[in-house]
Image (cartoon, rainbow, N blue to C red):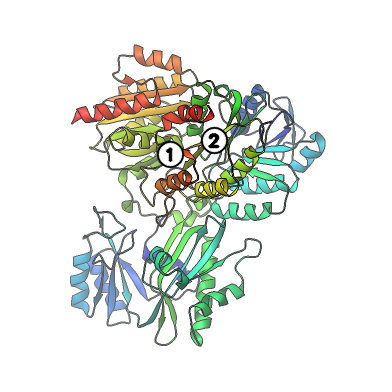
Amino acid sequence: MKIHEYQGKAILRDYGVAVPDGFPAFSVDEAIKIYDKLDSKVVVVKAQIHAGGRGKGGGVKLAHNRDEVERLANEILGMNLITHQTGPEGKEVQRLLIEQRVDIAREFYAGIVLDRERQQYAFMVSTEGGMEIEKVAAETPERIIKEWIDPSVGLQSYQLRNLVFGLGLQGAQIKNCIKILNALWKVFVEKDCSLIEINPLVVTKDDKVIALDAKINFDDNGLFRQKELAELRDTSEEDPAEVEAGKYNLNYIKLDGNVGCMVNGAGLAMATMDIIKLYGSEPANFLDVGGVANAETVANGFKLILSDPNVKSILINIFGGIVRCDRVAQGVIDAMETVAVKVPVIIRLEGTNAKEAANLLNNSTMEFLVANSFEDAAQKSVKAAQEMK
Amino acid sequence: MSILVNNETRLIVQGFTGQEGSFHGSQMIEYGTKIVAGVTPGKGGQTHLNVPVFNTVAEAKIATDANTSVIFVPPAFAADAIMEAVAAELDLIICITEGIPTKDMVTVNEFLKNKNTRLVGPNCPGVISPGKAKIGIMPGFIHKPGSIGIISRSGTLTYEAVHQISNNGMGQSTSIGIGGDPINGTNFVDALSLFAKDDETDGIVLIGEIGGTAEEDAAQWVIDNNFTKPIVAFIAGRTAPPGRRMGHAGAIIAGGKGTAQDKMAALKAANIRVVENPAELNITMKTLLH
């Protein structure tokens, strides 16, 4: 789960991490009120979206007075911000963060993420603040200092010193930075995070260390025990169909193609997307219906897939183990009676009672194509989509 | 021989009296797996599906000489259930549970170090040696005893592969679902090591997906250890967009790493036959074996 920068900073503030003074604004009026409240002549007007690269995209601007705040808030609020992380369609800016401008002496990177190869969390810092960490890792990996946290003992003081002295900090900066890095780890552990990135972490001219940006992602598997975090979710940053899918307990991800698919199992769902492409079309979505494939599930699946106007055919690929194929077939038949499906539906059912399922489908008055193999299903659904043009 | 589970398996089901534990417990019994005990805290002393239930894994092991456990416990309690089974010194633990917080598994992983217990999973369908024992939720009837070892991060895609193999005159020695999580107890390399020593296994089907480096590690292991049994691989997720979690917690392309293309290239470099079409696993395997 992702949250906005201002929400991340609020969490950091709670844990004693120095962040710039600032508040979120949902309207131009609010932005101006905040400017008046802040003890700073110069402020930064920052677009709040769940993507990076906002500065380069024109979503982060300096305002030197009240008029400029008004003008910039007007400009940025409601803009369609396109960054290298939003995709070409961009994201509409619905929230702003108005914060004091900080006097930056140096910029660093600090981040915590799971190192899957080591199977441990890694704390990374780098002198190359403000750059994409993947770029630094690719071009100048020696500029990244990494400490892996041993799960049996946790983050140790010597590791914090390795990180901070590795950045070349001096004097009061050292203590200030150690305090922040320690707090970041505390947040990471207590909130079940999957990623924390402070980019940049800045040192000011008077040796303060401040988190100028805050990106905090949470482990979806941990949310059940992080009830307060659920309130931070901004569904307007997510695809509406994907939000809808969550309500049905379905795993749906919208893609760009025109062959919709409904599958049980994430691996099989990905393989189905792949085979569609192999046969000449593009998948319109990923949809894992999980272990339950009854009429309600199938109907909801149809609704989700059909909410995408690009869809020209739908492939249902179910491998029934515990799930009985004839039950799924009946579910599909029933679902098609409640949802108007105006595109060709291709069904491939394999596993328990597959033959009974095929009979049910062939004898039904509903119109669909019954596939006799994985390949046949892909071919039929691609052909149907191409013919629908 | 097969690997990990066989006729000597004496199984404890943790979470036995719950919905999942009960249903799959009865399916496993039907298949012929020797379930010797169930564990549900608070229900010790009861009998369920004709099997004695105990309060703790330790008690169950002492009473029944169990050597294996399968875990059907909800995510909030699953890591603890795994550690309980490890502490009881079982040989093998298979954790079916999906949704365990990553942080918990980092801890479990540490706990497993220097212990004699192997963990498979979590978030996996289990392990089956056809004709001998089935531990997990896979449909037994699609499997046939034979000489193909299957190692997969998936559930139903594994069944797809098994189905193809069984229908093409071949069978499986053991099919092992290693699961879809970023942190797991047994990876491709571990399974390959076991299959390398198994006389009953002549060929391997490896099913991977986007995210992490498990497939790349497997490719390197094959090169370093001169593994000569033919391997056929399929990597799901060529069409997956970056940065999105595709169902499985571990199926995510992060920071440009973990793409299907990179994995396929690494496997090909180790002389592993990579199929682009998931419908062709059986044909390719058959070709390689003969």
Quarter the C terminus of chain A occupies:
top left
Q: Which residue shows up at 50% across the image and 21% down it?
A: B168
Q: For residue A343, which numbered disc appears in the image? A: none
Quick check: B21 above or below B93?
A: above
Q: Looking at the picture, how far across and down is residue A360, in whole percent?
A: 39, 14
Q: Which residue in the structure is indicated by mark 1?
A: A249
> Which quarter of the picture shows residue B130?
top right
Relative side of B29 to B271, left or right? right
Three-letter amino acid code at the position of disc 2: Pro
The answer to whether residue B37 is seen in the rendering is: no
Q: Percent x, y for residue A57?
A: 25, 64
User: On what subunit does the disc labeled 1 rest?
Assistant: A
Which residue lies under the disc numbered 2? B230
**Residue B29 horizontal side relative to residue A66, left or right:** right
Report which quarter residue B236 is drawn in: top left
Which three-letter amino acid code belongs to the residue tagged 1?
Asn
